[in-house]
Amino acid sequence: MSIAAGAVFGIRCGNFFASSIYDFSALSAEIKARFPDAEVIGTTTCGEISMKGFTNHSIVLTAVSGSEIRFAGVLLDAVNKFPIIHKTKILSAMNRCGIDANDPACHTHAFALAFVNGICYAEEALLSVFYAVVPNDKFIIAGGGAGDDLRFIKTYVSYNGDVVSDGAVILFFNTSLKFDIRKENIYKPNGKQVTVTQADVARRLIRTMNYSSPKKEYAAAVGCPESGVGDVTFDHPLGRRIGDEIFITAFDKFNSDGTVNMQGRVLPGSLIDILEPDNYEEISRNTCDEILSIIRRPQFVMFINCAFRALLFARDKSGPVMTSIYNAKFPVYCGFSSYGELFRKVYLNQTLVSIVIGE
């Protein structure tokens, strides 16, 4: 590997997405050497996204130049263990970027992109620390969980060549340019709801639904025998309602005692929608059109696409259709398939998060 054959100056930011088959530490160092002036962040993936489509075992890199955006990054390790230290680091990065965390209007000109290590239960801890530092609910942090090509062993994120496997990297954007950050659901309620009556929040474990076995209640809600629940969770995730929005959480596994582990936290007392697939090609076209109605000339487009969505597209052989939709709407884009997504204060699954910046 010899990416750093010659340094490229004047680049202000670099983002890269790499399959876990590569030596991520070496790759991170090489890319930083290639762009010495830039703030460089990266993540391992469960698939990569470019104008060539949804790929696997590849590397996607995007670089940003120009003076309209100021960048500052921070690498956090052991997110669950040292929140006070992390608060100081986050504030320092915001200050370097010219963002006042206590400015009630900071969300109008700034946001944060984050890659967090998957499979180490760091996502909600990261969001909790972040919004303890930024007391502005309108300020957006968006991003996704690092993947490892569905091996579920270890994931990595990096900042300027340094790598961690139990934390996160955050990159702040401070800009005069218009930007649009949103999430896209391609699932809809099937009309059935359940109430989470007992849960171990920290372990993401639901003990009872409707005061009964989660396996029993879920099977009844989707219309299948209890023995078949493992075959339908992909198409019927759970939807948590927060205000008027639905935030999806995916299933991890049903246990022998009828309890169920989820990919994200679910609170006791939550009323949960059972979801089913919607017309995702139509939804994706509408999403792109809505973005273009706000950002008429996109210059930077990033997609953080849940690995479960990528698996859905592969199963339905619709990846080329999705790529053609994006290619028709945007001049260039990049992204990766993630182990879960971050959007504002919520860690969610089976969702697309898009970040688009205009002129």
Image (cartoon, rainbow, N blue to C red):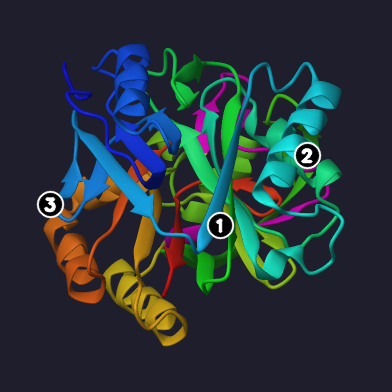
| Depth order, front residue of 224/140 | 140
- Give the residues drawn in magenta, as a range: 251-276
* Image position, residue 66 (x, y; %): 41, 59
User: Residue at 43% across / 38% down in the picture?
Assistant: 38
C-alpha separation, residue under disc 1 versus residue under disc 2: 39 Å
Q: Is residue 287 left or right of residue 261?
A: left
Spatial separation of the CA atoms under disc 1 and disc 3: 34 Å
- Comes first in the chain, label 3 or label 2: 3
Return the residue at label 3: 52
**Quarter-wise, where is residue 298 in the image?**
bottom left
297 or 214, nearer to the observer: 297
Q: Is residue 148 above or below residue 74?
A: above
Where is residue 73, by image quadrant? top right
For residue 149, say whether it is visible.
Answer: no
Q: Earlier in the sequence, mark 1 or mark 2?
A: 2
Most extreme residue toward the bottom is 293
Neighbor class of circle 1 (other Cα within 10 Å; few <14, some 14-19, many 20+) is: many
Looking at the picture, does residue 93 appear above or below residue 328? above
At 21% from the left and 63% from the top, the residue drawn is 322
Specify which label sits upstream in the sequence, 1 or 3.
3
Residue 281: say if magenta.
no
Whether 257 is among the magenta residues is: yes
Q: Position of residue 237 (x, y in %)?
A: 50, 49
Residue with the mark numbered 2: 91
